[in-house]
Image: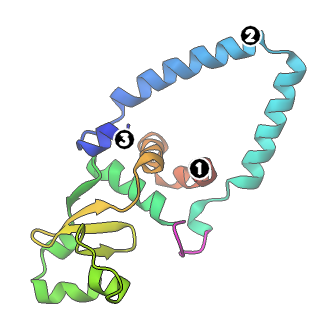
């Protein structure tokens, strides 16, 4: 999935069919061989884990990394890739863009000279090229592609309940 997102071809068909077939075969084999008491205990623990550790991500405070992963997953689901031109800033003249992102010079206040990107947008996207405002997801896309898959399958709101699974 990460490879598909990196080349800009993230879509459902090449992902869901092999995953679904593999999951059905693996779960069928493991359930067939397992003791019924073990299956019941695992189901109970899984249910408790779901109830306790999967609050919707939109209720997590917007600090740190919590909102970055779902937002980047939504970007991958929407665009099919981990990078692209950020249209809201690309349409502005260069002087008008400054208030909308943190430049790499401002980010580290001169302590570190960053050469790999020009700035940050919303903390989750690197600006890798000022012209034409090309952005790239700031985190490694492993968790983000799982969010993107759930967004494509179930929509945005249900994917928020999966935060604990991918973090």
> In the rendered view, would you say 63 is above or below 32?
below
Kindly report the distance in space between the C-alpha atoms of the residues bearing marks 1 and 3.
18 Å
Which of label 1 and label 3 is nearer to you? 3
Front one among 39 and 130 = 130
Which residue does the numbered mark 3 point to in the structure image?
2
User: Does the segment drawn in magenta span residue 42?
Assistant: no
Kindly report the distance in space between the C-alpha atoms of the residues bearing marks 2 and 3.
32 Å
Label 2 secondary element: helix
Label 1 secondary element: helix
Which residue does the numbered mark 1 point to in the structure image?
162
Can residue 49 be seen by looking at this rendering?
Answer: yes
Q: Position of residue 24 (x, y in %)?
A: 58, 18
Which residue does the numbered mark 2 point to in the structure image?
32
Residue range in magenta is 60-66
- Which of the marked residues, 2 or 3, is nearer the chain's N terminus? 3
Q: Residue at x 41, y 43 (%)?
A: 152
Q: Residues within 10 Å of mark 2 (few under 14, many from 20)?
A: few
Image-based side of 37 in relation to 157, left or right: right
């Amino acid at each position: 999935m990460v490879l598909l997102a990196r080349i800009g071809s993230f879509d459902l068909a090449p992902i869901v069919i092999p995953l679904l077939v593999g999951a059905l075969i693996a779960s069928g084999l493991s359930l067939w061989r397992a003791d019924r008491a073990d299956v019941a205990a695992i189901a109970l623990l899984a249910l408790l884990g779901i109830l306790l550790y999967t609050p919707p991500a939109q209720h997590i405070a917007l600090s740190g990394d919590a909102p970055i992963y779902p937002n980047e997953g939504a970007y991958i689901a929407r665009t099919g890739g981990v990078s692209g031109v950020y249209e809201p800033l690309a349409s502005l003249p260069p002087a008008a863009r400054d208030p909308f992102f943190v430049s790499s010079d401002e980010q580290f206040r001169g302590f570190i000279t960053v050469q790999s990107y020009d700035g940050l947008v919303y903390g989750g996207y690197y600006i890798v090229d000022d012209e034409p405002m090309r952005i790239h997801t700031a985190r490694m896309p492993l968790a983000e592609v799982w969010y993107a898959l759930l967004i494509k399958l179930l929509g945005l709101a249900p994917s928020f309940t999966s935060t604990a699974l991918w973090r």
